[in-house]
Image: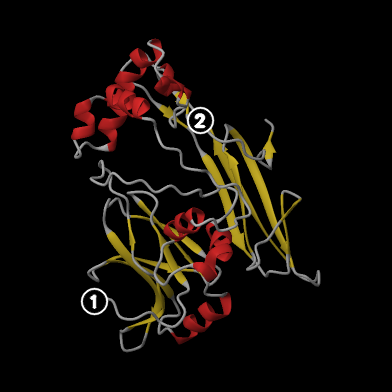
């Protein structure tokens, strides 16, 4: 494909990269627009396609007219992608309904850059909600995270608390270098796995010596700081139920009313603990004349060998539909 052609009107497809291995695609194309695309397609199908920046196609996924987002597994750090939504015409050509801007996955090695940019991305807001908040203040082709960082730095008023960057003192900076080791700072090609292992090996002496670094909480759960052995393991699970219906419909999950987004999408997210779950989901039309329902069943049975700890999780709402044996 070569160079990217111009965007098709107002961009309604977005691509975000927050992990070296995954991309997140979400779109504002509504149900009617996607249905019209299905009708025009020679095979009645709509596709989400992922490309490398040079136009080489990497993935093609058929999407539903009710779909609003997709997680794409790429496992390619420091790589630039873009995506398209469209359909195949009878002549075999791909008709593009919307094209995203480019997104680059983070590298999985230490960066050569020493400047730091901080951004607060609250977990209680969906990507779609964040996009609605700042849509009119985004630059053409600007990624969501970059726009959030820029606006937070400029003092934009957000409906959530924004963290403030604090600089390390010279003494704290030197303690950090001593803690990680000078070789670590100089080895800009060290992978994230190496950094974790180096940090683990340094944790116990730093903690016993009373250095300030020992007060940092671990992002890997309580086993990270307490482990004495070089080898460890922790694991856990979460469950996200999501879907969509008419924006004016009523949705209930296990009898509990669920708030819909303006476009009719909904989600329910909980920590997936051991047990059996039967979760009925029901949508009723605004006039009460039509009901559609689904029953989702899940079973988690955990078994471990050796010392395996649960990965730390944030507090979330209690799961619905638990079945007592």
Q: Give residue 3's mark.
A: 1
**Which quadrant would the C terminus be assigned to in this image?**
top right
Q: Quadrant of residue 128?
A: bottom right
Left or right of 139 in this view: 182: left
Q: Work out whether 204 lies above or below 155.
A: above
Left or right of 66 in this view: 115: left
Structural crowding at the residue carrying mark 1, measured as other residues with C-alpha within 10 Å and reported as few (<14), some (14–19) or many (≥20)? few
**Coordinates of residue 97 in the picture (x, y in percent):** 43, 80
Find numbered disc 2 in the image and state the secondary structure of the residue it sits on: loop
Judging depth in this view, the residue of 58 and 142 nearest the camera is 142
**Coordinates of residue 102 in the picture (x, y in percent):** 34, 66
Task: Give the residue number, with chain letter if any, for mark 2.
Answer: 312
Left or right of 257 in this view: 103: left
Residue 286 seen from this side: yes
Residue 304 seen from this side: no
Judging depth in this view, the residue of 193 and 58 nearest the camera is 193
Q: Are marks 2 and 1 in contact (CB under 8 Å)?
A: no
Q: CA distance from mark 2 to mark 1?
A: 44 Å
Mark 2 and mark 1 lie on one chain; the one further toward the N terminus is 1
- Residue at 50% of width from left, 30% of height from top? 312
Say how the picture is coloured: secondary structure
Q: Work out whether 194 lies above or below 17.
A: above
**Coordinates of residue 160 in the picture (x, y in percent):** 61, 50
Find numbered disc 1 in the image and state the secondary structure of the residue it sits on: loop
């Amino acid at each position: 494909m070569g160079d990217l052609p111009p965007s098709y009107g107002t961009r309604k497809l977005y691509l975000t990269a927050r992990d070296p291995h995954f991309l997140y695609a979400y779109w504002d194309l509504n149900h009617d627009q996607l249905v019209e695309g299905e009708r025009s397609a020679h095979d009645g199908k709509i596709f989400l396609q992922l490309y490398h920046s040079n136009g080489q196609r990497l993935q093609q996924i058929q999407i539903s007219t009710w779909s609003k987002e997709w997680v794409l597994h790429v496992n390619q750090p420091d790589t630039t992608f873009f995506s398209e939504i469209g359909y195949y015409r009878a002549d075999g050509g791909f008709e593009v309904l919307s094209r995203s801007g480019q997104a680059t996955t983070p590298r999985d090695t230490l960066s050569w850059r020493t400047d730091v940019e901080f951004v607060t991305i609250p977990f209680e807001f969906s990507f779609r909600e964040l996009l609605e908040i700042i849509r009119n203040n985004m630059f053409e082709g600007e990624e969501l995270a970059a726009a959030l960082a820029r606006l937070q730095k400029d003092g934009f008023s957000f409906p959530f608390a924004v963290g403030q960057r604090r600089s390390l003192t010279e003494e704290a900076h030197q303690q950090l270098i001593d803690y990680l080791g000078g070789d670590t700072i100089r080895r800009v090609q060290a992978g994230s796995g190496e950094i974790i292992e180096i940090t683990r090996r340094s944790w116990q002496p730093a903690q016993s010596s009373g250095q300030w670094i020992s007060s940092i909480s671990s992002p890997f759960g309580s086993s990270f700081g307490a482990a004495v052995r070089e080898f460890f393991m922790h694991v856990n699970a979460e469950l996200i139920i999501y879907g969509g219906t008419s924006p004016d419909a009523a949705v209930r999950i296990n009898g509990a009313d669920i708030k819909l987004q303006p476009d009719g999408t909904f989600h329910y997210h909980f920590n997936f603990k051991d047990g059996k779950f039967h979760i009925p989901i029901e949508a009723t039309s605004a006039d009460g004349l039509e009901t559609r329902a689904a029953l989702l069943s899940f079973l988690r049975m955990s078994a471990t060998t050796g010392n395996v700890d649960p990965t730390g999780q944030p507090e979330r709402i209690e799961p619905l539909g638990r079945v007592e044996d």
